[in-house]
Image (tube, helix red, strand yellow):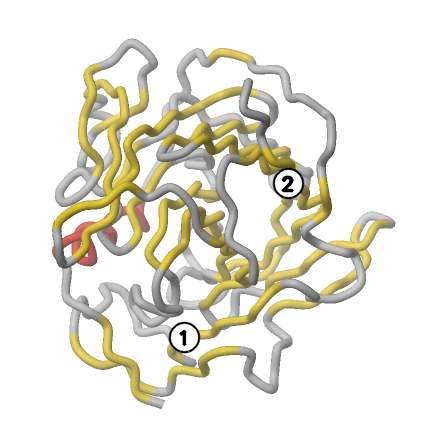
Amino acid sequence: MLWKSPVRFSTFALFFCLFLSPVSVVAERVDSKDADFQPLFNSRDLQGWDVWLGASEVPPLPFKFWGEWEDVLGLNPVDQSIFSVVEEDGEPALRISGEVWGALTTRESYRDYHLRLQYKWGEQKFAPRADKPRNTGLLYHAVGSQGAFWSYWMRSAEFEIMEGSTGNLTSVDSVSGSVQSRRDWSLPIPWLRYAKAGEPRVLGGLVFRMQAQQDLELPSGEWNDLELIVRGDSGRHLVNGVEVLVVENLRQPTDAGESPLLEGRLQLQSEGAEVFFRHIELRELSAAE
């Protein structure tokens, strides 16, 4: 199967996010509400989700940034072993092997919600990231075609889940947004870290990613709590109960110019590392929240 991916400058820029490292700073603790959450994962099978797998062999780094992708496995392939339901630490969990890149995608689209889940890393890592930090991601407000970006993921905002960088925000396929930030020259390009009282900057183009305020991930093998709180075109990233990034004015390019990005599907990435997810739950926000 041959897959054509559109050419965008952010495709080139996003390559650099594969080589990130954290620096810790102080963050503000936020309490989570615990009411009316509905499970998105039924602990038995993948009901309610679609499997998408991109090019069967991930090209070595650095990737090509344009052209045609060969051998795309596509939507709900016969062999769905990349995503499976297993027992881990005595409970049902969703296992993502990471061996072939792609995503598990909700069939429903969501807006104005509070999402929470737990994840922990497995042991396996695969080329071309076998010697890189373990990496996956929670993509939200995912819209458009499956595999639009590099044959693997939909246009979306990414809540990065990566060793040393969990909570980061990354633009996938030209999504833009406004984030308060400060310069941090210890970081890779574009040298920006979220800061609640920082200078507003637009995510997109050269500013393709934003480092979270603090790295709060627990040691590998321990379960971490993630929360995503979305209201309209804004999103809050929480790691282990602490708000580490806020984005506002999420937008996407259209033929008529940029338009607000207010809702979309959710994707969990397969991106070269074994990872487990459990307790994936969502509740709708009330008008007063």
Q: CA distance from mark 1 to mark 2?
A: 27 Å
Residue 19 as seen in the image, left or right of residue 254: right
Name the residue at 22% across, 81% down.
68
Label 1 SS: strand
Residue found at the far front of this picture:
287
Q: Is residue 45 above or below residue 231?
A: below
Name the residue at 24% across, 79% down.
4
Q: Can you give x and y, in whole percent of width and height, for residue 234 in the image?
A: 38, 31
Residue 54 numbered tag: 1
Residue 205 as seen in the image, left or right of residue 242: left
Instruction: Identify the image quadrant of the C terminus.
Output: top right
Residue 282 numbered tag: 2
Label 2 SS: strand
- Using the rendered view, name the quadrant where residue 113 is placed: top right
Q: Can you give x and y, in whole percent of width and height, for residue 204 in the image?
A: 19, 42
Q: Nearer the viewer, mark 1 or mark 2?
A: 2
Q: Can you give x and y, in whole percent of width and height, for residue 247 in the image?
A: 34, 29
Q: Can you give x and y, in whole percent of width and height, for residue 43 in the image?
A: 79, 56
Q: Answer with mark 1 or mark 2, whichever residue precedes in sequence.
A: 1
Q: Is residue 281 above or below residue 235?
A: below
Instruction: Identify the image quadrant of the N terminus.
Output: bottom left
Name the residue at 43% across, 22% down.
214
Q: Amino acid at mark 1?
A: Gly
Q: Amino acid at mark 2?
A: Leu
Q: In this view of the protein, which residue sits in the foreground, 223 or 32?
A: 32
Residue found at the far bottom of this picture:
1
Residue 108 numbered tag: none
Q: How many marks?
A: 2
